[in-house]
Image: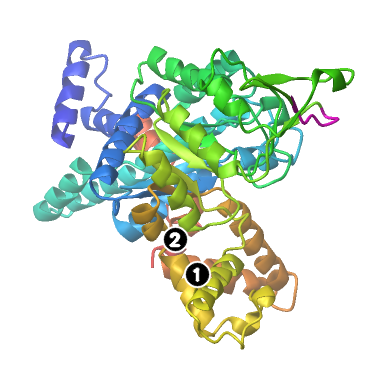
Amino acid sequence: MTYQQAIADAGKQIAPFAPTWSGIDAESVARMQLQNRFQTGLDIARYTAAIMRRDMAAYDADPAQYTQSLGCWHGFIGQQKMISIKKHFGTTKGRYLYLSGWMVAALRSDFGPLPDQSMHEKTSVPALIEELYTFLRQADARELGMLFRDLDAARAAGDEVKAKQVQTAIDNHETHIVPIVADIDAGFGNAEATYLLSKKMIEAGACCIQIENQVSDEKQCGHQDGKVTVPHEDFIAKIRAVRYAFMELGVPDGVIVARTDSLGAGLTKQIAFTREAGDIGDQYNSFLDCDEVDAADLGHGDVLISRDGKLLKPRRLPSNLFQFRAGTGEDRCVLDCINSLQNGADLLWIETEKPHIGQIGGMVSRIREVVPNAKLVYNNSPSFNWTLNFRQQVFDAWTAQGRDLSAYDRAKLMSVDYDTTDLAIEADERIRTFQRDAAAQAGIFHHLITLPTYHTAALSTDNLAREYFGDQGMLGYVKGVQRQEIRQGIACVKHQNMSGSDIGDDHKEYFAGEAALKAGGSANTMNQFAA
């Protein structure tokens, strides 16, 4: 609907109630309606699911069309990312947001900072989704409000050409609403609990839910030790629960990301149920670390399984967990991924211990032998030491090529002494092109950084504290923050406008006309930033 069509439609809604609605202006109504395009979270979920599906199809046609996101733990952070993306690139196409369970646990729990072990309140996850979209919708309202003011100014100046240009910009306005890849951890309980929480997340606007194959009550961060996986049938039940939630709420093309932590998980809590040799339960059990035993040698409480006519005793730890054979992680990952894609998942997530295209691509190639269009979401994690990892990868590659590396100590490659060397420069170039190369060579459709703003907030705060509380005093803030905001055109330098003050003034004028007491007058110090 164009701007003029919205005005005409609003006029039709008002007309039957004349003259008692004479104070309701059709153009003002149209402006408010355009500033509030999405009425519910389900509207958002349906809209963004369609975006993801189109992007997935575009990637299948051309792997250069991969997508990206950054993790966020507050609505303002997500909002500023989208505002920045539109400022720098003119469009949000291919850029999403990521909702990290790690950051919810560490920053949003009423218990205070928690490790990534699903101990935080499960309701904090849909609450953050709703908050993110509230801020993104406000970004739409703010941007459109500024266009409406430009339109009024052009009309007041009698500049019809400018007025038409602004009206075209209004008609072609691109929303800040983008898909959120939302982390549901291991589902916070059984399949029913997963279904119920999925519904809350979808109702808040989530079009994409990421779920992992760990045991809910033993959940660990993917980059820590002690991870415990569940048999495939248990995980598939949760994938189905998420799909049921999407379909019940009228979002059938919602996206499910099935994450496997098997590469770094050496334990299971359950021996899988198996009906016959070679079924998915038997395949899961085939990786258990077992000893062949004789019935006469059984100990008290021993657990046995039968395979190929032999009695095997899985190795059980005092924690009552069973361990897998060492070196089976990749094989288990591949099996996890195939079973997930064949039972309702749309995308995969393989949690790795390092960013290595060869490792990821090798597993994806095996998966694609069975599911040709398999695609990954990949965690470009701050848990990796990217500098050290890639310098070591270059070191190893150059060693294989027979190059002289006597000037380098592989164990100390993180040292600043190497920062300007050829090896460091090559490593940085590989980091720069990692996402592009991995999209082409390793089937990665979506690249994300889970915890970027956790780290940027800490870094910027440290820099400000050092300057402000040190010799620089107020200059530490002005030079390091405000002057940079002004020079770089950061929207929130006008923090009153960013918080919605101008939107509120517009509403006051709609509601009260000339009697409106507005905040944006000549005495507003925000006017100092007009230049």
Q: Which mark is residue 389?
A: none
Q: State yes or no: discs 1 and 2 in contact (Cβ < 8 Å).
A: yes
Residue at left offset 82%, top offset 32%: 317
Residue at left offset 15%, top offset 52%: 165
The residue under label 1 is 484
Residue at left offset 63%, top offset 46%: 327
Question: In the rendering, at what x and y percent does residue 315 appear?
Answer: 77, 31
| Residue 279 shows in this picture | yes
The residue under label 2 is 490
Quarter of the figure with the C terminus: bottom left
Question: In the rendering, at what x and y percent does residue 280 appear?
Answer: 52, 22
For marks 1 and 2, give the CA distance: 8 Å
| Residue 503 shows in this picture | no
Region rendered in magenta: 313-319
Indicate the secondary structure of the residue bearing disc 2: loop
Amino acid beneath label 1? Gln
In this rendering, position of residue 38 left or right of residue 526: left
